[in-house]
Image: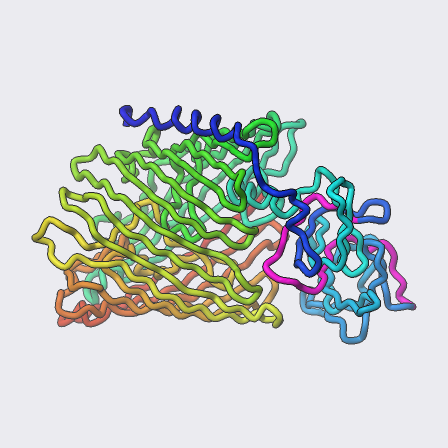
Amino acid sequence: MLRRIWIVPGLFAFALTLVGIKSTEAGPYTKLREGYGVEVSGSWNKGIFDAKSVEKLAEARRPKLRGTIEKLDKADSSFILFGLKIKVEAKTLFPARGESTGGLENLKEGMRLEVTCNVSKANRWTADKIDWNEIKPSDKIKGTITRIAFDNKPPDTIEISGLKILITEETDLYGSARYLEEELFGNLTADEGGTNVPHIRVGEQVLLSGDYRQTTRLEKSYTLSEVQEDDYQDTEPALRLEAAGNWAPEVQSFLQLRMRKKYTFGTFPNRPSTVESTRFEFQAIQAYLLLRAPAGRKAALMVGKQRVRDQREWLFDEYLDAARLYVYETQPVVLEASFLPSLFPFKDEKYRTWDDLLFRVRFIPDGKNEANVYMLKRWDSDLRNREPVYWGLSYYGRPKQFVTGWVQASLLRGTDKQRDQEAYAFDFGATFAATNLSLRPSLTLGYALGSGDKSSSDTISQEFRQTGYEDNSGRFGGFANFQYYGEVLDPELANLQVLTAAAGFRPHKQVSVDAVFHTYRQNQLDTDVRSDLITPPVAPNAVSKDLGWEIDFVLGVEKILKRFNIGYSFGLFNPGEAFAPLRADNAFLNRLNVRVEF
């Protein structure tokens, strides 16, 4: 690794060079037009909405406002929000709160609400839907620009059906860096989202937060044997503490500590047959500095132990030592160069002999879509000499309100066990959700393929192997994350074809249910399945490619009392003809995740 340490000062030098480049981008005002859909964050101030940031949406939309009722007139069936008179009609929807629906009688002055509106040509506003349950504290407006009053000398205004929005020099307009920074540096910049962003203030510079997590697993018949006793259970409580430091406009820090201990139960080959606990772990799983370029230049360097992940955790989801350079002068295009040396790996991690270099060109047009191309090169000091080179492209996002899609494609080159690698993989699919219906039903279809080795006796391997940093975890239409190639089999995408179909719905705004079905086939006949969990006493027979099928049920419960999150998964794997002629038993998994934020 030491012979490659030059990469770190090289990244610093590259950053300093790019910091001196002046942006040739046109004025940000030119990126707003009448008819554009926008999302505006800010606050109501003396008769006008003072915009903190403006983000362009993928398409025009009707207005949706989130704020505080200024005045309520029940006799007139109306209320004032952001200076607008909004009428409540008999057909206005009030989503259920607990076991009862709301109505105008439940509203009161000072209450926070989120209202979806219809606006007439005369700018008469009526409420189509009013949500009044656990509304976020930040004010926000979504809608379509109907008027622009810009002279490129702020302050200026835009209007959404008569609602005036003030644009100042401090406003982050479309083309600004905020949504990019939320994606790149989430723990330090996001004010909403799935992560527990530090929020308990200590002095002027430090924010604290934390969470308690407990994961419990029950595995049955993971050897696929009808005669061998192999039930297994473990539970792992973990406590995380986080601190974010804002030391200067150009300098921030993030520290995340984790304390955990696993307890195992059951009977399983090579596992304990009585209660046994693993050693107690106290680790700094993240400890890094974020150094921004001065004078508002759009470049930043993150140095230290940090979580490296992609949207679907197909390439990365690990806590790694890293120096990561981001340059976004050309936004929405982001240039990323990252060096990932194994300086202080956690004990017994498989990547402790790896050093990786990652280059990515990322296109992030808004907070909902990202496409990128990448190259990942590895050096390995282990005798195995696993030194792959990945060339790939990916997309994940929501191009329309009702569809979320993904595409992964990768070519694998390099060497592994002194064999050259010439392999490929792809994964694509989409989730279609009826977001306008109360149950929000969704349907997901996906297909993934990792190439297989035609012959193990030659000098070239055609078997695709994932990076070793992957987790293959995500979500479809619900709140809970799960292993999207199967909770039980949980395979690596190597010599494998996976066809996925799923359906889900949300019986409550904080509850989701998904049913996910997979079929598995080998790409080339082989006596191996690359899965960490399934360890059958009899390997696949290399006669049939049919590995079997799996069905998973996933329950997600989000933000109970704003702090409790629950995820539960039940999975059943049914082995296929590849395990014949010996009869194989089904394998089962029950997994419960509980997280409490504070």
View extreme (bottom): residue? 91
Q: Quadrant of residue 127?
A: bottom right
Q: From the viewer's perspective, tell me whether residue 542 is left or right of residue 442.
A: left
Image coordinates for residue 461, horizontal then vertical, percent: 16, 52
- Above or below, 370 against 526 in this view is above
Q: Which residues are magenta?
A: 49-75
Q: Quadrant of residue 354?
A: top left
Q: From the viewer's perspective, tell me whether residue 362 is left or right of residue 154.
A: left
View extreme (left): residue? 457
Q: Is 72 a magenta residue?
A: yes
Viewer-side residue, 81 vs 73: 81
For the image, the number of numbered tags is: 0
Q: Is 260 a magenta residue?
A: no
Viewer-side residue, 535 vs 150: 150
Pick the quarter of the image with the N terminus: top left
Residue 100 appearing in the image: yes
Q: From the viewer's perspective, tell me whether residue 466 is left or right of residue 146.
A: left
Q: Residue at x 56, y 51 (%)?
A: 366
Image coordinates for residue 130, horizontal then vertical, percent: 74, 64
Image coordinates for residue 151, horizontal then vertical, percent: 76, 45
Pick the quarter of the image with the C terminus: top right
Viewer-side residue, 298 vs 209: 298
Q: Residue at x 33, y 64 (%)?
A: 588
Residue 50 appearing in the image: no
- Above or below, 465 against 127 in this view is above
Image coordinates for residue 138, horizontal then vertical, percent: 70, 48
The colour scheme applied to this rendered structure is rainbow
